[in-house]
Image (cartoon, rainbow, N blue to C red):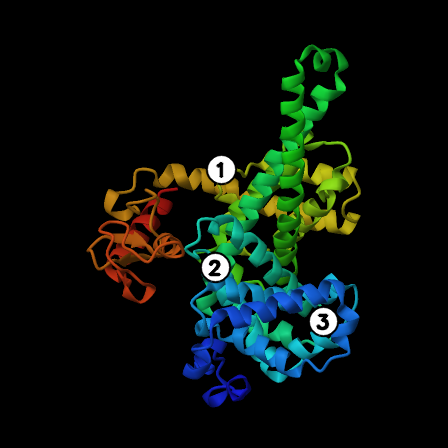
Amino acid sequence: SSGINAEYGPEGSWITATSLLPQNELFSTLPEYVIDNIADTIIQLSRFKINFLQRLDLTHICQLVQICVCHPGHFKNPYLVAKLIEVIFSFSPEVQGKANPVWDRIIGTASAERFLIPAMLEFYTDVESTGSSNEFYDKFSIRYHISSITKTLWFSTTTTHQYTLKQCLNEGRYVRFINMLINDTTFLLDESIDCLRSIRDIQRAMANSDTWEALSEDERNEKKGKLAQDEKQCRSYLTLANGTVHMFHYLTTSTQEPFLRGELVDRVAAMLNYNLLQLCGPKCANLKVREPEKYGFQPKVLVQQITDIYIHLKSDVFVEAVAGDERSYSPDLFTMAIGRLRNNLIKSAYEVEAFEEFARQVKERYDEKQVMDMEFDDAPDEFKDPLMSTLMRNPVKLPSGVTMDRDIIQRHLLHSTTDPFNRQHLTHDMLEPDTELQARIEEWVRERLGRK
């Protein structure tokens, strides 16, 4: 267990678990099925014989879980690491209904306080690609376990894990984690909403006795089967979606800067605008189903949390990003949202006023932006980003010789480490600022604005 007792780096620098925990070659030779069988046994006992487990001395098992999760390089199989994370999840107070000694032993050591969160955030992004044919759907259940553990640690009585998580988010290397969180939130809420609409359509068809009876028995059975399938998927998607939205909510309460980075802020704004439109827009009535609680659908809670996130991130750069979202934002969207907040008593009068003030600032910036876009529409092509055809603010040169806006290429690098023009390897440190072009752009903008 010496590996998990490593200390901070020189001068108290923040070094993640991966760099601090040397891989033990002898331990790596252990057949994976040994760890797999231990994990399976512990998970099953936690479900059906938790009192029996709590009477045992599981110190070595807890150390084993810590070592394996905090340094997954011992295993080639990512699903084995996922199962060990499930071991931690199975002992969490959220699953067991109360705190228990095994949970305290796993997360209460100094090693876990320093290394568990960084390792899980790394794995959250790594599990995007596992090589399995079911990797796309497997990742959501794995990430649900990670988000559930993270939430429990965030709201624990000690603040050490919360501090560790904040430190991680402020590191550039965890930008991919936030990006994955954005992707998951968008996909899961989108799928949930599609399922709810389908459920509503079938429920309405079944409620119309004349139309329903006019269908053949095979057609009715087909619709009933589709309803059962949609209900099952909806419960699953909403469980995961509620978790990701809640994670966004509590993380942005006290940590804003990571979400306002240039390569992320536009994506965060677009995600919030899109989901607010789904929940408060003209078509939100299509989401009304019978017994929504059966599926875990709590629209008031979702709207409350999403509008809270806007306020958490309120800043000039975020107002700019929200106003610049051409896909979902419109001044009418926030007007509808404010009406829903007030009419359904989702927020207090003070909170509604705070959101109204935010909406006013966004509307003001949106109007300015409409004028500016018209002014700069005829900018020289060399001043425009070649991918988005927008005026560059911070041009950088790629090794391929192409010049792009820094935020746009950094956003691309969140998904791919290749040059979009020649598919060669590309990383952030290979981007070279084009200060001469930036000066020319700024001069051109000043001249344009000076004419007004």
x and y percentages locating residue 221 in the rendered image: 66, 23
Residue closest to the far left: 401
Instruction: Please count the marks in the image.
Output: 3
x and y percentages locating residue 120 in the rendered image: 54, 67
Q: Which residue is mark 3?
A: 156
Q: Is residue 166 found left or right of 205 in the rendered image?
A: left
Above or below: residue 426 compared with residue 133: below
Of pointers 3 and 1, the one earlier in the residue sequence = 3
Task: Say which of 255 and 47 sits in front.
Answer: 47
x and y percentages locating residue 306 in the rendered image: 64, 49
Above or below: residue 86 compared with residue 216: below
Separation (CA) of disc 2 from disc 3: 26 Å
Q: Which residue is mark 1?
A: 327
Locate the N terminus by quadrant: bottom right
Q: Residues within 10 Å of mark 1 (few under 14, many from 20)?
A: few
Q: Residues within 10 Å of mark 3 (few under 14, many from 20)?
A: few
Residue type for callout 1: Arg
Q: Residues within 10 Å of mark 2 (few under 14, many from 20)?
A: many
Q: Is residue 425 found left or right of 346 in the rendered image?
A: left
Task: Say which of 184 and 361 sits in front.
Answer: 184
Q: Is residue 363 visible?
A: no
Residue plotted at (43% across, 78% down): 29
Residue type for callout 2: Val
**Badge 3 element:** loop
x and y percentages locating residue 440 in the rendered image: 26, 54
**Badge 1 element:** loop
Q: Are marks 1 and 2 in contact (CB under 8 Å)?
A: no
Residue plotted at (74% across, 66% down): 93
Q: Which residue is mark 2?
A: 127
User: Hey, which quadrant is residue 430 in on the image?
Assistant: bottom left
Residue type for callout 3: Ser
